[in-house]
Image: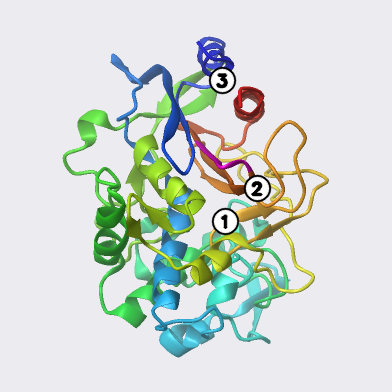
Amino acid sequence: MTEAERVLRDAVAEGKLPFAVAMTGTSQGTTLSTAAGEAAEGRAAAEDTVFRIFSMSKAIGSLAALILIDRGTLSPETPVAELLPEWNDLQVLDGWDGDTPRLRPQRTAATLRHLATHTAGIEYEFWNADVAKYLQTQNHPPALSGLKAALNYPLTSDPGTRWSYGLALDWLGRMVEAADGRRIDAFCRDEIFAPLGMHDTVFEPDGLTDRLAEVKMRKGDGFRPTRLSPPARPEVYGMGHALYSTAPDYLRFLRMVLNGGELDGTRILTPQAMELMMQDQMPDGVSFEKMTTVAPPVSADVDMFPGTRAGHSLAFLRNDADIPGKRSAGSLGWAGVCNTHYWIDPARDLAAVLMTQSLPFMEPPMVETYDAFERAVYAGI
């Protein structure tokens, strides 16, 4: 048993995670595959366990946009409103008069780059109290309702001015649909999942429920079952949250990135598009900001690299400096709200996924386990 495997086995035994599936790989293949605990009652976690990957969907949405950038159909500077005029109807929430929101027009024009780097000004209610208040007082549907109207959140800042994590990738997916003509699920199936051999990555888990993991929520020292899934057959598939996948499937996507846009002889992106996927694309003066929770049962605070600047490519969060004992400068990664995590370290030709189905996101036991797992992976290289 490797140290990385022991870390996960012990974390499950100690109640830090309900279960875990983890894999590592290089551009050439898989180097570790391990699982611990039960993904559902009476069913052991395994390599083929199916996960709700939520915000791990975002990088797939970005890849869809990058494919169209490669073809000259879109560019990073394409205005959102050029394809989706309704974007300009969104106003900026500038405060409150009691329960009446003060709203004003946007002062800057949002582009595809702003959406892909989470600098378009649109935030989830989990990390912004004003957005949470707006949804409640204005009876506005939340993102996970699956309704098209749910995308019309007010902005909390002008595009290009600050990190604002939210529904931007849902809008980016709609830009892809408008530019290409196919619905986003068909586009991803034809252009990404089939070419990469990601046969268990889907928008609807039909036929996969016998492998689908249960979601658990922290209760004291243990976990209790809870219900949280992407909306089934929504009006709009939100590329911020819509996908189900497995560890081997997602590792194939990460290995494509490590291999410069190609996997097993199939090229997905040109080297020029890979630059956009891997290099910092944030507006000048803007970087990742600590995300302070306003919904503790759903998420703890999120600060991925305290004390280290993090930027964002057109697909991934990107740390500027080496993290001692862990990933190198220029590494890429993100996660999903039910604690599915991944990183890509191009400098070390290494990618990894660590996946469970638990809430709150980034709670201390999960953070401790992720840290120990990553350190064990690097110590074993």
Residue 191 magenta-highlighted: no
Is residue 156 shown left or right of residue 231? right
Dominant secondary structure (helix, strand or loop) of the stretch shown in magenta:
strand
Which coloring applies here?
A: rainbow
Q: Earlier in the sequence, mark 2 or mark 3?
A: 3
Q: Give the amino acid at mark 3.
A: Ala
Quadrant location of the C terminus in the rendered image: top right
Task: Compute the Cα span from label 2 to label 3.
Answer: 33 Å
Residue receiving disc 1: 316
Q: Earlier in the sequence, mark 2 or mark 1?
A: 2
Mark yes or no: residue 274 visible.
Answer: yes
Label 1, residues with CA under 10 Å away: few <14, some 14-19, many ≥20: many
Q: Residue at x 54, y 63 (%)?
A: 277
Is residue 28 shown left or right of residue 192? right
Q: Dot 2: what SS?
A: loop
Q: Earlier in the sequence, mark 1 or mark 3?
A: 3
Q: Is residue 79 or residue 381 the one in the foreground? A: 381
Seen in the picture, residue 251 relative to 203 is either above or below; the reply is above
Q: Give the amino acid at mark 2.
A: Val
Residue receiving disc 2: 294
Q: Check contact, mark 1 vs mark 3: CB within 8 A.
A: no
Residue 4 marker: 3
Task: Compute the Cα span from label 2 to label 1.
Answer: 24 Å
The residues colored magenta run 348-352
Mark yes or no: residue 246 visible.
Answer: no
Whole-percent x and y of residue 67?
A: 40, 70
Seen in the picture, residue 109 relative to 361 is either above or below; the reply is below
Q: Give the amino acid at mark 1.
A: Phe
Q: Dot 3: what SS?
A: helix
Q: Residue at x 70, y 70 (%)?
A: 96
